[in-house]
Amino acid sequence: MPVGISPWNVIRYVTLVSVAVIEALNEAVPRLPKEMISLPQWLTSGIWHLVPLSLLVILLVVNPIAFFISRRRPRLLLEILTPIDGSEVDLMRTVRGAVTIAGAPVQLLVYAGDNRWYPQRRATIDGRAWNAECQFGNPQSGAGEHFRVVAISTSSPIRNPTENLPKRCVKSQIVNVVRQAQ
């Protein structure tokens, strides 16, 4: 995995370059003739030699912190694979998809002409693949109408029709479908 540019990496690189420059100066300055050097006393004193060590200590502290902060949990993503946008569906249709974290709960919602999202059964999950049977309308109505379907992942399932999708959940893309005319 390539190393990205992050604040932690910038701190590491700046610290390492600083240590290298200071060490080079520590080696070069004593060898120069005193007439060529007009450095302040504090730069040529013993404290100057502690700077590389202190920068290395900072690096030793920053690296473990950066390591633990960068070990983020994988991001949960949902995707509907079938049906594709614009497909025709029957009254009942199996919707299939994928999730980035195996075993994450998946529920599907179907948006109907009455401007409400209707919860479907929880999806059957097999590793990172999932599928669920969805109903588009009912036997008496819905033929030729447009519907939308979305997969969501929440800690508790939605049990009743709702006008809005939950705000605090992971959502897939919304797929637009048309129910076949009878």
Image (tube, grey):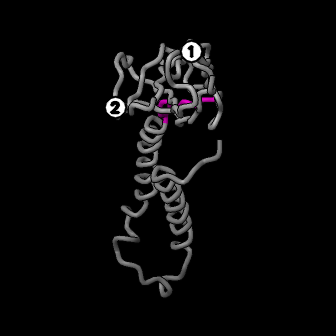
Dot 1 or dot 2, earlier in sequence: 1
Q: How many marks?
A: 2
Q: Identity of the amino acid at label 2?
A: Glu
The Cα–Cα distance between marks 1 and 2, rounded to whole angstroms, is 21 Å
Residue 74 covered by magenta stretch: yes
Residue type at numbered disc 1: Glu
Q: Is residue 6 visible?
A: yes
What kind of secondary structure does the magenta stretch mostly adopt?
A: loop
Q: Which residue is mark 1?
A: 133
Residue in the foreground of this view, choosing between 147 and 99? 147
Residue 120 on image: x %, y % = 47, 17
Q: Residue at x 36, y 61 (%)?
A: 47
- Which residue is under mark 2? 163
Q: Residues within 10 Å of mark 1 (few under 14, many from 20)?
A: some
Magenta region, residue range:
71-81
Q: Nearer the viewer, residue 178 or 122?
A: 178
Where in the figure is residue 145, as x and y percent of width and height? Answer: 53, 32
Q: Residue at x 51, y 25 (%)?
A: 142
Q: Residue at x 53, y 56 (%)?
A: 13
Say which element carries label 2. Answer: loop
Q: Tell me the residue at 45%/53% (across/down).
A: 7
Q: Nearer the viewer, residue 77 or 159?
A: 159
Residue 180 image-quadrant placement: top right
Residue 107 as seen in the image, left or right of residue 45:
right
- Where residue 113 appears, as percent x and y from the top left, is 44, 32
Residue 68, image x, y percentages: 45, 34
Decide: few, some or many residues near mark 2? Use Cα within 10 Å; few <14, some 14-19, many ≥20.
Answer: few
Q: Is residue 30 above or below residue 146?
A: below
40 part of magenta stretch: no
Would you place residue 43 above or below residue 66 in this image?
Answer: below
- Classify the position of the C terminus by image quarter: top right
